[in-house]
Image: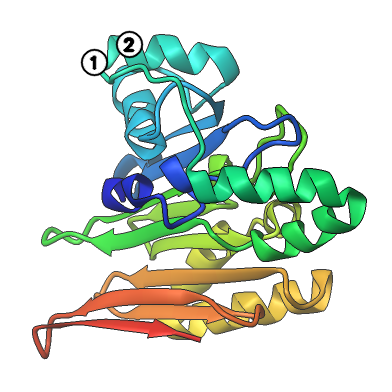
Amino acid sequence: MEYMEETGVFNAGRGSSLTSDGRLQLDAAVMVGRGLKGGAVGACECTYRAARLARAVMETTKHLLIVGDDCRLVASEAGLRIEKLRPTQSVLARFHRDARAGREGRRSATSEHRHGTVGAVAIDLSGVPAAAVSTGGIWLKRPGRVGDSAVIGAGIYADEASGAACATGIGKEIIRNALSWEACRLMKRSGASTAARRVIEQVSKRSGTNTAGIITVDLRGGVGFAHNTPVMGRGWLDNRRDRVVVELG
């Protein structure tokens, strides 16, 4: 997760989308199925390692979600480096181009940057599922906006009775449909692949297409993915053939 946050390629960490006033405000969450432990941060402006900070919320505080300036205190107490967040040159150039283009440019940018969230699901050798997610949110969002990636049950969920799930897409629709929680609920009666497909069918009926994608893992180690968007990149470790599989489409 940290590698993807650091590359500047994804809409997470260094490569995150900008707010309408040109700032980086990051959302992230982590969850472990055993004991339903979780932590999340929203509108974070003090570190590119938002997923690590979310883990610090889970491990070092009694809270589930910390937002805004108070993320800085949690980061400091956890020993994370406090940084002034700066956009990459490509993101900054796009921001200035869209500012010149005005409202029409903002519409195209919103579509272009909607699905850059990075997330992961896993199950360890003892059978405990976990999930993590990190994002910069939607392009030119209003400052202070917190999306689904910071909401346990929406952007991620993990339950030792079923598995783990992580979502990406339009945050408000993912929250409204409790997408990751619903995927884990379905996994109690079916495998990861079937649950992923069914939950995306549900959100498509309720909220329309081009709204969401999801990745899942069940307690047997089965993996699943589904999306109603044109493209969603994904990769997984195939233990049976000892290889990493990467797909885009």
Quadrant location of residue 125?
A: bottom left
Q: Position of residue 61 (x, y in %)?
A: 37, 17
Q: How is the image coloured?
A: rainbow
Quadrant location of residue 30?
A: top left
- Tell me: residue 71, above or below residue 143: above
Q: Amino acid at mark 1?
A: Gly
Taking the image as drawn, is residue 120 in sight?
yes
Residue beneath the point at 25% across and 75% down:
221
- Mark 1 in CB contact with mark 2 (< 8 angstroms): yes
- Tell me: residue 187, above or below residue 80: below
The residue nearer to you, when weighing 174 against 69, is: 69
Residue beneath the point at 48% across and 64% down:
184
Badge 1: how crowded within 10 Å, few (<14), some, or many (20+)? few
Badge 2: how crowded within 10 Å, few (<14), some, or many (20+)? few
Query: What kind of element bears circle 1?
Result: loop
The residue nearer to you, when weighing 18 against 198, is: 18
Q: Position of residue 147 (x, y in %)?
A: 65, 43
Q: Amino acid at mark 2?
A: Ser
Q: What's the mark number on residue 79? A: 1
Query: What kind of element bears circle 2?
Result: helix
- Find the distance from the CA under tag 1 to the CA under tag 2: 5 Å
Is 174 on the left or on the right of 134, as rendered? right
The residue nearer to you, when weighing 187 against 65, is: 65
Q: Position of residue 1 (x, y in %)?
A: 31, 51
- Tell me: residue 67, above or below residue 163: above
Q: What's the mark number on residue 76? A: 2
